[in-house]
Image: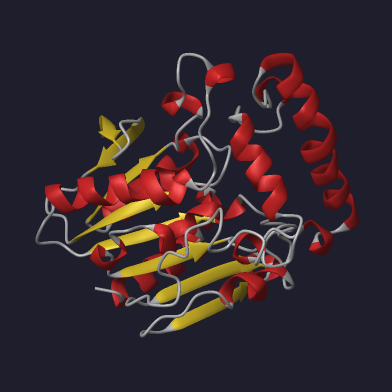
Amino acid sequence: MQKLKIKCEDGVELSAVLFEPQKPKAAVQLCIGTGAKKEFYFPFARFLVEHNYAVCTFEYRGTCESAPASMKDCNYNYIEYGTQDMPAVLEFLDKKYPHLPKLLVGHSVGGMNFGLMPNYQKLGGVVAVGSGSGYWRNMPLGYRLQTLFFFHIFRPISVLLTGYVAAKRFGIMEDLPRKVVKDWADWCSVPNYFWDERFFGKTIPVGHYHELTFPIAHFWTIDDPIANEKNVPLLLQNFKTTKTLTSEKLIPAEFGVKKIEHFGFFKKQFKDTIWTKILNKLEEMQ
């Protein structure tokens, strides 16, 4: 395991970690969920290394070890995850492993923003896990109320008092820049997320979602409050690829568990089940 700093085109440095097997057969860019720590995904990264994949995972700008010295002065926005951070990591992998296939495993936002990457054609395939449009009205009632509280009560009060969304001290998620959560709230207010006509082609670059050239495999679970049976189709309708696009529904009971939810995919208990499903998709994409 090697700790890295990866510089984006606009000069922002990201905290990253590279896991390497002795003889890698492909390189995987592991893009995490919003407000999460990269360390949560380390067991899954090591699993891929056991199967001879080099894996680079990282934290998006403005959070955890990729945060600036002063969060209150941080003006990063959410779309830069896809236009700056993700392409910078892919560029790093391409330079380090020029002759190996480059694949992307993305959790939540990590499985959504790849179409914004200007260097998307360097990818040989994407596995998206727990990714959905995020439309708040399609969430279960309890989670809907939590979402509204976070976006419209907690966020503005926290920004007023600290200048950023200080979520970590309350155990909600990692701290985030104020503009990131403002964007997030705006996009979750409409069914088609940032593809809505209010944003897409205006504040959001059109990107390459309708000209993708690699296979996409998508996994979701029936108990995920965010990427659920209503929000998953809203996301996938925006992906157009010349290759295959598949989506597999996971049912917790079929894996002998009561819940998977939004983050459960990456827990060690699923090494021989869900992780193996993801691995098989990566194998097919080479």
Image coords of residue 196 (percent x, y):
65, 66
Please report the residue visible at 42 percent of the width from the left and 64 percent of the height from the top: 207
Residue 250 visible in this rendered orientation of the protein: no
Say above or below: 280 vs 106. Answer: below
Left-right relation of 263 to 18: right
The part of the image, by quadrant, that contains residue 121 is bottom left
Which image quarter holds the N terminus? top left
Closer to the camera in the image, 132 or 44: 132
Please report the residue visible at 26 percent of the width from the left and 30 percent of the height from the top: 4
Say above or below: 249 vs 120. Answer: below
The part of the image, by quadrant, that contains residue 192 is bottom right
The part of the image, by quadrant, that contains residue 231 is bottom right
Which image quarter holds the C terminus? bottom left
Please report the residue visible at 49 percent of the width from the left and 64 percent of the height from the top: 128
Left-right relation of 185 to 217: right
Residue 103 visible in this rendered orientation of the protein: yes
Image coords of residue 17 (percent x, y):
31, 36
Please report the residue visible at 53 percent of the width from the left and 39 percent of the height from the top: 77
